[in-house]
Amino acid sequence: MKGFVRAALAAIRPADVLPSPNIWHWPEVYQVENRAQDVDGAIWAALREECDWAGLDVVDVGCGDGFHLPLFAATARSATGVEPYAPLVKRAKTRVEGIANASVVAGPAQRLPLPDGSADLVHARTAYFFGPGCEPGLREADRVLRPGGALAIVDIDGAAPPYGPWLCADEARYDPAAVAEFFAANGFSVRHVTARWAFQRREDLESVLRIEFSAPVAQRAIDETPGLSFDVGYRLHVRRKPIGLVLP
């Protein structure tokens, strides 16, 4: 296992890494964002209903600073975070210190540093899997999944206001309909989830919006949000690896 991981790490190339300016450049603000996201646990409830990981082996792709790993590890047999950005790998390892069944490895979604058939659930939340172009990551997830295992992708629903229109205003090339068609064509189910983001202070809400969007769109979002919370629509896409022989 250690030899396999060392070889995979040596193969990481800059082109494999999809930059995430929000958490890369403002990790402390992103920590505030993580705590504010889904305060009612709507995404976690939907995930458990679709692919409960209790007693199973979980891989969190693009785990960032490891925020979700302790939550998976609380009931999973093991929880492994995979993250390509070295400073976040370090932060994630610090977060899971003392959690015996949680670990972090460095690597890209396109070449996971994990053996074949080593996971029951591969989870990715707003990381790498944004529709057309993510096929290498889909193949890798299938490789590390055991038969019957699930790939669960949680992504922002660009068609769901208010957050979706803000996202689309900032990313002109992002087409929510095309993304939905891509996942349907690749055998994924879809479940729409509404999560509430709630902040304790107005300055925290504004700081988070400013790291998520360009200055004009961030100001628009701030102006359209009078209080301390707003709803964010998500799509939960799930695909299971077939059991047994599958013929074309």
Image (tube, rainbow, N blue to C red):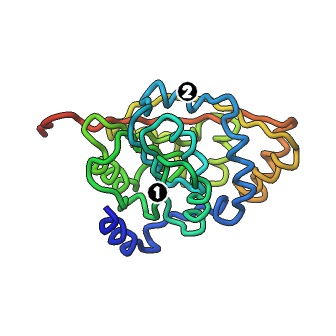
Identify residue for label 2: 45
Amino acid beneath label 1: Val
x and y percentages locating residue 23 in the rendered image: 65, 59
Look at the image and tell me in which quarter the N terminus lies.
bottom left
- 53 in relation to 139, above or below: above
- 127 in relation to 70, above or below: below
User: Image point 53% across, 53% down: which residue?
Assistant: 63
Identify residue for label 1: 82
Q: Cα distance, mark 1 to mark 2?
A: 23 Å
Q: Nearer the viewer, residue 58 or 243?
A: 58
Q: Would residue 202 appear left or right of 3 to someone viewing this image?
A: right
Q: Would residue 87 appear left or right of 183 to someone viewing this image?
A: right
Amino acid beneath label 2: Ala
Give the secondary structure at mark 1.
strand
User: Image point 61% across, 28% down: which residue?
Assistant: 42
x and y percentages locating residue 46 in the rendered image: 52, 27
Q: Mark 1 and 2 residues: CB-CB less than 8 Å, in contact?
A: no
Q: Quadrant of residue 40?
A: top right
